[in-house]
Image: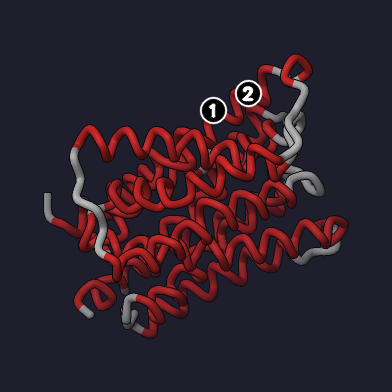
C-alpha cells in the first residue's frame, strides 16, 4: 500500500471513530459535569498512554517538541472536549455534529500556518464550499435557538483544527500514536491535580448510558482514534486527508438518531450530501497538497 492510500485509509478509520465522540459526550453529560468529564477522560487516557509508552520503551521527546505537544494537549485533550461538553448542555448532539463539517477548513488553515502546506486553488474552493454548506445550516433560524452552544462549538472547532495540524506535523518525527500518548502524559499531572479539587459526581446516581459515554470518549475519542488520525494526516497530507472530516457529520448524525433517538431533519441530510460532494472535489486537488 502506498503512503498516500495508507494515509487516507488511516484517516477514514480515525473519522469513523471520532463520529461517535459527540453522541457519546451527549450521553456522558446527562449525569456528569462537563469539567469533570474533560478531566477524567484525559486522566484515564493519560494513564493508558503512559503504560503504552513505558512498555514499548519509547525515547523521551526532544525539548523542542514539548511546545508542540502542549499545543496538541490544549487543542484536542482539553480545549475541544471541554467546549463541546459545555455546548452539549445547551444543544442536542445532532445540531452540534453539523459543526464538525467545519473541521476540515480549520485544519487546512492551520496546516498552511504550521506545516507550510500549499493546497491548490481548487482544493480551497471545495473546502470553502463544504464549510459554507455546514454554515448555512448551522446559522439557519431553527439552529440559532441555541446561540451560546453554537459559539462554544465554533471555538472548539478552531482549537481542534490547531491540535490536528500541530499533531500531524509532529507525527512525522515521533509517530502518530506516540504523539497523542506523549501529549496525554504531559496533561496527566494537571488532570489528576484538578480532579483532586473538582466536584465529584454522586456515582450511584450516574446511569449506565453516561458510563458508556465516558468509556467511549476516554478510550476511543481520546486515544485510539488519534493513533489512526495522526498517522493518516502525516502520510496523506494534513489539508488533504483533513477533508475526510466532512463526512464525519453523516456518521455522527446516524449515531445520534440511532442511539439518542434525536430527530434528523431534511435540512441536515441536504447539507451533509453537499459536503460529501465537496470531499470528492477536494480529494481531486489533494495531489498538489501532498507534493507541496
At a point 44% along the width and 62% down the height, the residue shown is: 70
In the displayed structure, 250 sits above or below 285; it is above
Q: Secondary structure at mark 2?
A: helix
Mark 2 residue crowding within 10 angstroms, few (<14) / some (14–19) / many (20+): some
At a point 22% along the width and 62% down the height, the residue shown is: 172
> Mark 2 = which residue?
211
> Mark 1 = which residue?
215
Residue 262 in sight: no
Apparent side of residue 286 relative to residue 102 in the rendered image (left or right): left
Query: Label for residue 255?
Result: none
Residue 15 appears at what percent x and percent y? 43, 47
Q: Secondary structure at mark 1?
A: helix
In the displayed structure, 287 sits above or below 1; it is below
At a point 28% along the width and 49% down the height, the residue shown is: 178
Q: Nearer the viewer, residue 195 or 278?
A: 195
Task: Tell me the quarter of the picture where residue 205 sits.
Answer: top right
Q: Nearer the viewer, residue 135 or 46?
A: 46
Apparent side of residue 283 relative to residue 149 in the rendered image (left or right): left
Q: Nearer the viewer, residue 55 or 260?
A: 55
Residue 2 appears at what percent x and percent y? 12, 55
Apparent side of residue 150 relative to residue 132 in the rendered image (left or right): right
Residue 112 appears at what percent x and percent y? 38, 80
In the displayed structure, 276 sits above or below 165; it is above
Which quadrant of the figure contains the C terminus?
bottom left
Residue 124 in sight: yes
Q: Residues at badges 1 and 2 in contact (C-beta under 8 Å)?
A: yes
Question: Marks 1 and 2, Cα distance to the nearest angstrom?
Answer: 6 Å
Q: Nearer the viewer, residue 214 or 2?
A: 214
At a point 38% along the width and 38% down the height, the residue shown is: 224
Q: Residue furthest top?
A: 204
Tally of numbered tags: 2
Residue 78 appears at what percent x and percent y? 57, 53
Amino acid at each position: 500500500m502506498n503512503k498516500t492510500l495508507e494515509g487516507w485509509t488511516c484517516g477514514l478509520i480515525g473519522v469513523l471513530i471520532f463520529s461517535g465522540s459527540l453522541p457519546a459526550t451527549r450521553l456522558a453529560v446527562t449525569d456528569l459535569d462537563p469539567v469533570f468529564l474533560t478531566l477524567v477522560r484525559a486522566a484515564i487516557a493519560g494513564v493508558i498512554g503512559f503504560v503504552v509508552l513505558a512498555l514499548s520503551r519509547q525515547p523521551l521527546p526532544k525539548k523542542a517538541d514539548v511546545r508542540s505537544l502542549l499545543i496538541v494537549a490544549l487543542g484536542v485533550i482539553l480545549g475541544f472536549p471541554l467546549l463541546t461538553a459545555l455546548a452539549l448542555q445547551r444543544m442536542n448532539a445532532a445540531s452540534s455534529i453539523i459543526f464538525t463539517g467545519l473541521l476540515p477548513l480549520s485544519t487546512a488553515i492551520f496546516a498552511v500556518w504550521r506545516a507550510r502546506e500549499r493546497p491548490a486553488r481548487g482544493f480551497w474552493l471545495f473546502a470553502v464550499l463544504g464549510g459554507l454548506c455546514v454554515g448555512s445550516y448551522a446559522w439557519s433560524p431553527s439552529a440559532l435557538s441555541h446561540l451560546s452552544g453554537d459559539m462554544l462549538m465554533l471555538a472548539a472547532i478552531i482549537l481542534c483544527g490547531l491540535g490536528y495540524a500541530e499533531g500531524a506535523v509532529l507525527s512525522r518525527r515521533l509517530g502518530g500514536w506516540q504523539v497523542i500518548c506523549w501529549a496525554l502524559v504531559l496533561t496527566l499531572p494537571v488532570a489528576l491535580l484538578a480532579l483532586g479539587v473538582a466536584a465529584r459526581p454522586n456515582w450511584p446516581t450516574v446511569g449506565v448510558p453516561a458510563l458508556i459515554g465516558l468509556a467511549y470518549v476516554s478510550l476511543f475519542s481520546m486515544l485510539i482514534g488519534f493513533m489512526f488520525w495522526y498517522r493518516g494526516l502525516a502520510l496523506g497530507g494534513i489539508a488533504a486527508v483533513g477533508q475526510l472530516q466532512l463526512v464525519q457529520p453523516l456518521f455522527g448524525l446516524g449515531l445520534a438518531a440511532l442511539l439518542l433517538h434525536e430527530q434528523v431533519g431534511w435540512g441536515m441530510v441536504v447539507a451533509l450530501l453537499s459536503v460529501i460532494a465537496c470531499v470528492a472535489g477536494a480529494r481531486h486537488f489533494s495531489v498538489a497538497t501532498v507534493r507541496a
